[in-house]
Image (cartoon, rainbow, N blue to C red):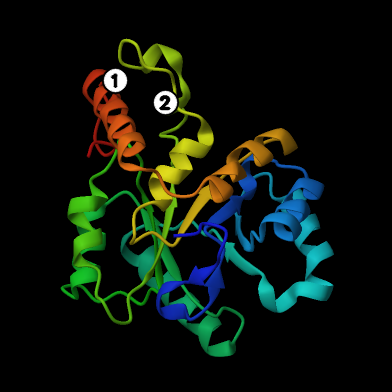
Amino acid sequence: MDFRKQVPFGRTGLAVSRMGLASGYGAPAAAIEKAFHEYGVNYFYLSLVKRARMVRAIRNLVPQHRDEIRIVLAKPTFGGFFLRSFVDRVHRLKESGKVRFVGMSGHDRPLFGKIARGELEAPVDFFQIRYNAVHRGAEKDIFPHLPRENRPGIVIFTATCWRKLLKPKLMPAGESPLAPADCYRFVLSHPDVDVCVTGPSTAAQMEENLRALSAGPLDDREMTRIRRIGDHIYETSGIPPPLAR
């Protein structure tokens, strides 16, 4: 498994980089463009905040690389009537050709599991879900239920568990905190994951996070250590629902 190589993004048929970039933390436009040119990162997640720098980078890249870039536009919505209205609007956008694919993001793992098993019909082409060394419930609730054929693309967020995996004071006795790249390598080592999104704030953080691509999958020893650290944080940090496993 080579994290530097792009992979098919589920049923979309698009090729995506193993790591994607989120706009919400304000990484410089030049660092975003460098990630595309030097690391092959082509998955860009535009949130509702701090998106100006990523928009600038995309505008600079599009003239020569339009067909290579994958842009995901975040659109929060609510339940009930508002959800139905939003889904209807998305369908119209797809029919008009303005949107090619639709994804769904959330913390409700059982819901994603029902969609994956075909028990619940949902017009989505990819899932964006929480998965990290602390919160591994997707290994039980979602991943085993993905269809072998025509499966949705899988995108992961919160690989560092909101930086808990990076904090020395949360480590088991005698353990050093994880490097950011280790957190992303843990996620990308799972065979059902297509993309892991990272949200750097600076060019230095961008370089540090993207080291995961060249480092490649974790070996058994590294995987055992990271799972042990994740278990310790889960058992000692008092994480409440809906963030529990």
Q: How many marks?
A: 2
Tell me the quarter of the picture where residue 25 sits: top right
Q: Which mark is residue 237?
A: 1
In this rendered view, identify the residue nearer to me: 242 or 225: 225
**Dot 2: element:** helix
- Residue at the spot x=77%, y=43% of the render? 28
Q: Is 160 drawn above or below residue 1 in the view shown?
A: above
Q: Is residue 83 visible?
A: yes
Query: To which quarter of the image does residue 152 belong?
Result: bottom left
> Left or right: 231 with respect to 188?
left
Could you say which is closer to the camera, residue 213 or residue 162? 213
Residue 9's spot in the image, x, y percent? 46, 72
| Residue at numbered disc 2 | 164
- Quadrant containing the C terminus is top left
Q: In this rendering, would 163 be left or right of 142?
A: right
Task: Say whether disc 2 or disc 1 marks the residue closer to the N-terminus.
Answer: 2
Q: Residue at x 71, y 42 (%)?
A: 27
Query: Tag 1's secondary structure?
Result: loop
Q: Is residue 72 above or below residue 205?
A: below
Residue for point 28% across, 34% down: 224
The kind of residue on which mark 2 rests is: Lys
- Residue 195 placement (x, y as % from top left): 48, 58
Query: Residue type at mark 1?
Result: Ser
State yes or no: discs 2 and 1 in contact (Cβ < 8 Å): yes
Residue at figure coordinates x 45%, y 35% from the top left: 160
Quadrant containing the N terminus in the rendered view: bottom left
Mark-to-mark CA distance, 2 and 1: 9 Å
